[in-house]
């Protein structure tokens, strides 16, 4: 006597029913051509009957042969579009939080990249001047443009007044000094005040 496992219960064990072979995952079962043709004929016939009844109720008439030809052509166009349609995009799952999709992953990787750049720029003034300051300058110009309608290049005097001397000189003289956390905080505070 067997131990009464699930295999015995569902028929794969001794004395049980034979199991049907399982299809591999991702395999789509296709209908036979005859079933597809009969299904299309039924859909076209029903649509023709409904359209003919609606037209006759409105006092109009159309040749049944023309109507069936039009519906058959429409069905063929729909079939052709389905055949050439690209496969659906795969669904990506996020591992952290409720964010999902490639946008959240791209944002996360950008934030990580910036964290690494800022950590390295702390000890390397050249990296700071090459990577961090141009982005700060770009953000500053964008903020000036959105809030005041100017950029540092279009109206330097007004931009200097708005930015303050510290941020202005840091952006104007990029190789002057290395990155310090309190300097970045000061720069960001000045940018937020814009």
Image (tube, helix red, strand yellow):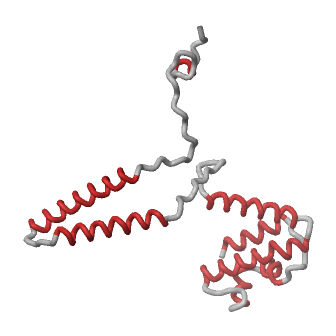
Q: Nearer the viewer, residue 141 or 120?
A: 120
The single residue placed furthest to the top in the displayed view is 1
Q: Nearer the viewer, residue 185 or 60?
A: 60
Task: Residue 74: name its quadrant.
Answer: bottom left
Name the quarter where the C terminus is drawn: bottom right
Q: Nearer the viewer, residue 105 or 19?
A: 19
Q: Residue at x 38, y 65 (%)?
A: 78
**Residue 115 horizontal side relative to residue 12, left or right:** right
Is residue 186 positioned above or below 162 on the image?
above
- Residue 166 % position (x, y): 81, 77
Is residue 35 positioned above or below 56 on the image?
above
- Residue 56 % position (x, y): 10, 67
Q: Residue at x 10, y 69 (%)?
A: 58
Task: Residue 190: name its quadrant.
Answer: bottom right
**Residue 5 horizontal side relative to residue 108, left or right:** left
- Residue 16 % position (x, y): 52, 18
Q: Residue at x 38, y 69 (%)?
A: 77
- Residue 7 % position (x, y): 57, 21
Name the quarter where the N terminus is drawn: top right
Task: Residue 127: name its quadrant.
Answer: bottom right
Is residue 48 positioned above or below 36 on the image?
below
Q: Residue at x 21, y 72 (%)?
A: 66
Is residue 163 positioned above or below 65 on the image?
below
């Amino acid at each position: 006597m067997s131990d009464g496992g699930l295999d015995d219960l569902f028929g794969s064990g001794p004395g049980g029913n034979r199991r049907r072979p399982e299809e591999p995952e991702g395999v789509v079962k296709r209908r036979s051509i005859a079933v597809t043709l009969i299904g299309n004929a039924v859909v076209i016939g029903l649509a023709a009957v409904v359209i003919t009844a609606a037209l006759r109720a409105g006092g109009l008439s159309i040749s049944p042969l023309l109507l069936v030809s039009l519906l058959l052509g429409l069905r063929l166009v729909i079939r052709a579009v389905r055949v050439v349609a690209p496969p659906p995009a795969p669904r990506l799952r996020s591992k952290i939080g409720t964010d999902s999709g490639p946008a959240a992953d791209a944002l996360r990787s950008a934030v990580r990249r910036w964290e690494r750049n800022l950590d390295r720029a702390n000890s390397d003034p050249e990296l700071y001047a090459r990577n961090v300051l141009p982005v700060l300058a770009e953000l500053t110009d964008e903020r000036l443009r959105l809030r005041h309608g100017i950029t540092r290049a279009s109206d330097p005097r007004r931009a200097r007044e708005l930015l303050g001397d510290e941020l202005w000189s840091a952006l104007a003289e990029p190789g002057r000094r290395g990155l310090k956390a309190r300097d970045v905080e000061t720069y960001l505070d000045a940018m937020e005040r814009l």
